[in-house]
Image (cartoon, rainbow, N blue to C red):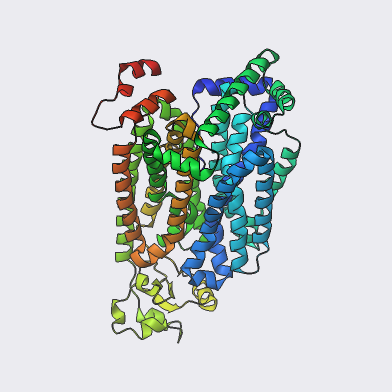
């Protein structure tokens, strides 16, 4: 997904990775066991999109109240912000292994609470537990893998965690589809996440702590024992010496900038080079969210319904397209990011995103304009169950399906037997929905019959295709490269929090925006944010492809300008990348 990011890894790393794990299966055991955290991250952020359709059916208060739907979706994101913040402290204080075990307990508890939830507020509590686990897993799983992997294949193994995130999202859509006709639907969808959490908990009990964390805590012999299981015997001493030097440098840096979070943040913004890096890093993370990606990932079945696809099962099935393409895009990014560069991929991606959002806005506008009219004859067919707002309207002949489904009316549309002909606007009750379906008609409550619906599916897919390889993965790569060494931890943390916070704002407001602006207006608003993001990326974000950390730091010290040839983009750097 979007939030975890994928570290870069080239073909050489993947070849070496295959050889290394073939020689030492223990390495893959470590990486896959920790990587389940990434899988759970992806699953729990993706599963709610389909589950929400059935939660609305079981709890009428959720169906009526948009803010309640948004709260159920976004509380996992709110929990993730707090989980990521406390996860950093837990990682340093108690170790990576214990942090993963705590995340598993939170995942399992959240899944169990949601599966047995008797009321919407209990689902929200479960989502908060799951969000805490997501926030902790999003930073702990890749950290554990990175520190417990041979340095030559570290990028490939951490990249695998990113693939597990998008793979978890894809599987969540498959699970949603599998349980659409099962009694309990959403309870199974949300509750089944407890199983991989339990599996990881049991696996992690048998695995060691990160050797780097052990070394920092003075447990040198324990650290050496783990290194000996990962590296060939002749490389163990060299790795121990390298770890000693690295840990000493880290402690020296902590001594120079302070250990308190507030002091580190203050010094980061006070340093000119780091401040410019933060402008670029925060810019790409906020832009990643404000192009509207998580409206697609969290609400894609709902968006399909806005496009006129009434069936929950069909809406969930079509949403598999977006999730699958997101996973494929992660692989495409790893193949091209070191060839074409970070900045270029993001700019191309943003141009594609803007184009797709404009077309989607037009599609939803046309779908609304050509919605079937309301027929008084068809409405009268259902007796005295006419929509109250329609019956008392001063000019009911001007009503169409969209007017019938608007929040002010809160009614349902029963299509004509000829799907696109004028239909009935009647009270939204389970009995009338059943009566409508009994006559082989289609019952609509979120969107209207539309000949343009298939275009929404096509351009949502194109949106993911242009988003995932660029804005989906590159912002995380940029943030791993752009900060001076002494501020790398705090800089990455600030950028990650800005990403989660932007995610929360977008997911918490999407349905409310569609109520007030319509689907067309909401996508047009995202166009505006995307244009602002493109401008900010153009002026603030330098190209870091093939550059050493020191070269990036010198570039930012001088100040980046897209209209000036920087020394870092001269022939020397080009030669370095060849």
Left or right position of 276 against 235: left
Q: Taking 422 as reference, is 129 above or below it?
A: above
Q: Residue at x 44, y 73 (%)?
A: 414
Q: Camera-side residue: 270 or 516? A: 270
Is residue 46 visible in the rendered image? The answer is: no
Q: x%, y% of residue 404?
A: 38, 74
Total numbered circles:
0
Q: x%, y% of residue 23?
A: 68, 19
Q: Taking 488 as reference, is 171 above or below it?
A: below
Q: x%, y% of residue 530?
A: 33, 48
Q: Residue at x 67, y 16 (%)?
A: 237
Q: Residue furthest top?
A: 234
Q: x%, y% of residue 221?
A: 74, 24
Is residue 572 visible in the rendered image? The answer is: yes
Q: Camera-side residue: 81 or 200? A: 81
Res 75 quadrant in image: bottom right
Q: Residue at x 62, y 55 (%)?
A: 129
Left or right position of 195 against 11: right
């Amino acid at each position: 997904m979007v939030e975890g990011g994928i570290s870069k890894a080239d073909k050489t790393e993947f070849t070496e990775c295959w050889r290394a794990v073939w020689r030492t299966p223990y390495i893959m055991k470590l990486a896959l066991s920790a990587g389940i955290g990434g899988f759970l991250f992806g699953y729990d952020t993706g599963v709610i999109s389909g589950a929400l359709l059935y939660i609305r059916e079981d709890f009428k208060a959720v169906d009526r109240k948009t803010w309640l739907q948004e709260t159920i979706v976004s509380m996992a994101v709110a929990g993730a912000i707090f989980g990521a913040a406390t996860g950093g402290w837990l990682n340093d204080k108690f170790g990576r292994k214990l942090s993963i075990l705590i995340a598993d307990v939170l995942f399992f508890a959240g899944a169990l609470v949601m599966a047995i939830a008797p009321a919407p507020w209990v689902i929200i509590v479960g989502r908060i537990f799951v969000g805490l686990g997501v926030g902790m897993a999003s930073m702990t799983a890749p950290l554990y893998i990175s520190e417990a992997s041979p340095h030559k294949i570290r990028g490939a193994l951490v990249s695998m965690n990113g693939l597990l995130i998008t793979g978890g999202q894809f599987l969540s859509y498959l699970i949603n589809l599998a349980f659409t006709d099962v009694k309990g639907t959403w309870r199974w969808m949300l509750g089944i996440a407890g199983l991989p959490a339990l599996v990881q908990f049991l696996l992690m009990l048998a695995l060691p702590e990160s050797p780097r964390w052990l070394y920092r805590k003075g447990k040198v012999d324990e650290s050496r024992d783990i290194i000996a299981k990962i590296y060939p015997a002749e490389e163990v001493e060299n790795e121990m010496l390298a770890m000693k030097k690295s840990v000493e440098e880290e402690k020296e840096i902590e001594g120079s900038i302070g250990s308190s979070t507030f002091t580190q943040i203050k010094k980061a913004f006070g340093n000119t080079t780091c401040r410019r890096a933060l402008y670029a890093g925060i810019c790409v993370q906020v832009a990643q969210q404000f192009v509207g990606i998580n409206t697609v990932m969290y609400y894609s079945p709902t968006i399909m319904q806005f496009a006129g696809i009434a069936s929950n099962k069909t809406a969930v099935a079509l949403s598999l397209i977006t999730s699958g393409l997101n996973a494929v895009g992660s692989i495409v990014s790893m193949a091209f990011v070191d060839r074409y560069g970070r900045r270029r991929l993001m700019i191309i991606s943003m141009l594609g995103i803007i184009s797709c959002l404009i077309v989607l806005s037009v599609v939803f506008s046309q779908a609304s304009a050509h919605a079937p009219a309301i027929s008084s004859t068809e409405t009268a067919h259902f007796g005295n169950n006419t929509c109250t707002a329609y019956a008392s309207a001063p000019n009911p002949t001007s009503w169409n399906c969209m007017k019938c489904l608007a929040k002010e009316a809160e009614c349902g549309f029963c299509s004509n037997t000829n799907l696109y002909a004028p239909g009935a606007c009647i009270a939204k009750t389970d009995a009338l929905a059943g009566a409508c379906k009994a006559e082989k008609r289609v019952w609509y409550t979120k969107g209207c019959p539309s000949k343009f619906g298939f275009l929404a599916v096509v351009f949502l897919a194109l949106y993911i295709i242009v988003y995932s390889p660029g804005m989906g993965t590159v912002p995380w790569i940029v943030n791993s490269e752009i900060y001076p060494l002494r501020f790398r931890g705090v800089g990455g943390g600030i950028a990650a929090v800005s990403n989660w916070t932007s995610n929360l704002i977008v997911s918490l407001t999407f349905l409310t925006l569609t109520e007030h602006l319509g689907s067309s207006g909401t996508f047009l608003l995202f166009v505006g944010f995307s244009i602002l993001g493109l401008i900010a990326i153009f002026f603030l974000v330098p190209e870091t492809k093939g550059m050493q950390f020191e070269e990036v730091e010198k570039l930012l010290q001088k100040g980046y300008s897209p209209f000036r040839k920087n020394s870092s983009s001269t022939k020397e750097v080009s030669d370095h990348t060849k």
